[in-house]
Image (cartoon, helix red, strand yellow):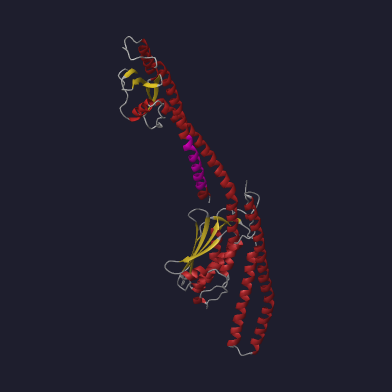
Amino acid sequence: MRTRLLPLLIILMAGVLLALGFPLAASLAASEQQRVVVDRLDDAARFAALAQFVRETSPVTDERRITLGGELASYHDVYGIRAGIFYRNNRSMAAAPEDWVVPYEGEGRRAFREALLGRRSHDPPQVWPWQPHARLTIASPVVRDGDVVAVVVTDSPTGQLRSRILRGWLLIFAGEAAAMLLAVGAAFRLTGWVLRPVRVLDSVTHDIATGRMNSRVAATGGPPELRRLALSFNEMADNVEEALEQQRAFVADASHQLRNPLAALLLRIELLALELPEGNEEIASVRTEGKRLAQVLDDLLDLALAEHTAAELRLIDVGALTGERVVSWRPVAEDKGVLLTGECGAVTAWADPVALSSALDAVIDNALKFTPAGEEVAVTVAVSPDGASVSVVVADQGPGLTEDELSRVGDRFWRSGRHQNVKGSGLGLSITRVLLTAGGGSLTFAPNDPHGLRVTVSVPRHAPLEAAERGFGER
C-alpha cells in the first residue's frame, strides 16, 4: 500500500512546490530587471538634464556638447552600455559609440517614439536566462521650455542581469529541492506510521484465516481510528475463537458421549449374531455400518482435539522422520502389491513431530488406498526453491481427481462420488490440514503425471513468529 500512497503524496507535494516556485521565479526575474530599468532611467534622466543646455551649434565649439559626449563615452567604456541623445529628426546630438544611431525597428524604435510624446518608455519585455542576445532599451525625453527637443536612448547588454536571475533561480531550486526532500522524508515517516498498523492487521488476519486463532493485534500505535479498529478486531477474534471453542467442545463431547452407547450397541449385535445362522447378511451389514460409525466418531474426536491442541514446534530432521513412516507403511503396500519408494535426504525444518507423523500417515494411507496393484507410490523430500520450506511430496498412480474434486479435497466429510466404496470417513485429510496449519505448514493437492494424485506436505525451515509477539510497533 505504501508503494501506491507514497508516490501520490510526493506528486501532490511536488505540485504544491512547483505552484509556489514558478510565481516566485517569475517575481524574482521581474524584480531583478526592474532594478536595472530604474538604474537606466536614472542614468537617462541625468543625461537628459545635461542635454537641455546643448544648443544646435558646431560640435567643435560647443563645450557642453563635448562634455556630454565625454560623459557618454565614459559611460560606455565603464559599463558597456550604448547611449545617445538624438533629435526628433533622428540626428545625433552625442552618442557612444559615435557611429551608433537610433534603431529603425523593434523595441528601440518603440521606446524612441514614446519618448517623443513626452513620457518615458514603457518597461521593456521580460528578459529570461535562455535569451543570450536580449538587450534592454530605455528612452527618456529631453525637455526644454516645455517641448521635447531630443530623446536619450540607452541600450544595455543583459549578461549580468541574466546571470543574477539564473543564480536566484538556482537558489529557489535548491530550496525547493531541500523542501521536497524534507517532505518526502516526512511523507515516508507518516505513511509508515499510518500503514504499519494496517500491515500488522493484515498479517494477524492471515494468521487467523490459516487457523492460528490466538493471534491478536497490539493496539498501541498508529492513528486513533486504527487503534479503535485494532480493539474491535481483537473483540471480534475473541468472539470467533469462543464460538469455535464451543463448537469443538460440542463435537468432542458428542463424540465421547456417543462412543459408549455405540460400543454397547455393537456388543449386543455381536451377541445377537451368535443366536443367528452364521453368515447372516443383515447382521454383517449392521456390524459394518456400526464399525464405520465408530470410526467416524473417533475421527471427529481426533479433529476436535487437533483444532484445540497447540503445536509443539521443534527443529527436526524431516527426511529421517519421513523415512521412518515409509518403512512403517511398506508392509501394507506389499500386501496390496504396490511399490512404496522414498527419497528422504537429511534436511531440517520446524514442525511438531507428532503432527507431522500423523499427517504423513494420513497422506500415505490415502495414496495406498487408491493406487492399484502393480503401481508405485513415490515419497520425496526436498527443499523449496526459495529455501523457506521443506516439502514432502507423495505421488501415487491412482485414478486421480478432476479439477472440481481437487478444489474440494480435504473438506470435512467430503469423498469423491467415484470412490464411495473405499473405506474411510472423509475426515483424515481434514485432520491432517488442521495439524499442519497449527504449526505453520500446509497441505496442497495437484494432478500427478501421467495419472494419479500429488499431495505436498510443507513445513517451514525457520521458526514461525508467534502471533502474540506481533504488534503495531513504534509510532
Residue 395 location (% of width, % of height): 48, 66
Q: Which of these two is toward me, 173 or 318?
A: 173
Confirm whether the magenta stretch covers residue 284: no
Which residue is at 51% across, 57% downward? 345
> Which segment did they paint magenta?
6-24
Main SS, magenta region, reads helix
Residue 469 makes an appearance in the image: no
Q: Which of these two is toward me, 46 or 424?
A: 46
When asked about the image quadrant of residue 442, the answer is: bottom right
Viewed as shown, does residue 75 lie left or right of 173? left
Q: Which of these two is toward me, 96 or 399?
A: 96
When asked about the image quadrant of residue 123, the answer is: top left
Q: Is residue 87 above or below residue 378?
A: above
Q: Residue furthest front?
A: 145
Q: Which of these two is toward me, 46 or 276?
A: 46
Residue 451 makes an appearance in the image: yes
Q: Is residue 177 above or below residue 236?
A: above
Q: Is residue 414 above or below residue 323?
A: below
Residue 311 location (% of width, % of height): 63, 60
Viewed as shown, does residue 447 lie left or right of 472? left
Which residue is at 50% across, 40% downward? 17
Count of numbered circles on the image? 0
Confirm whether the magenta stretch covers residue 16: yes
Residue 96 location (% of width, % of height): 34, 18
Q: Is residue 450 above or below residue 148?
A: below
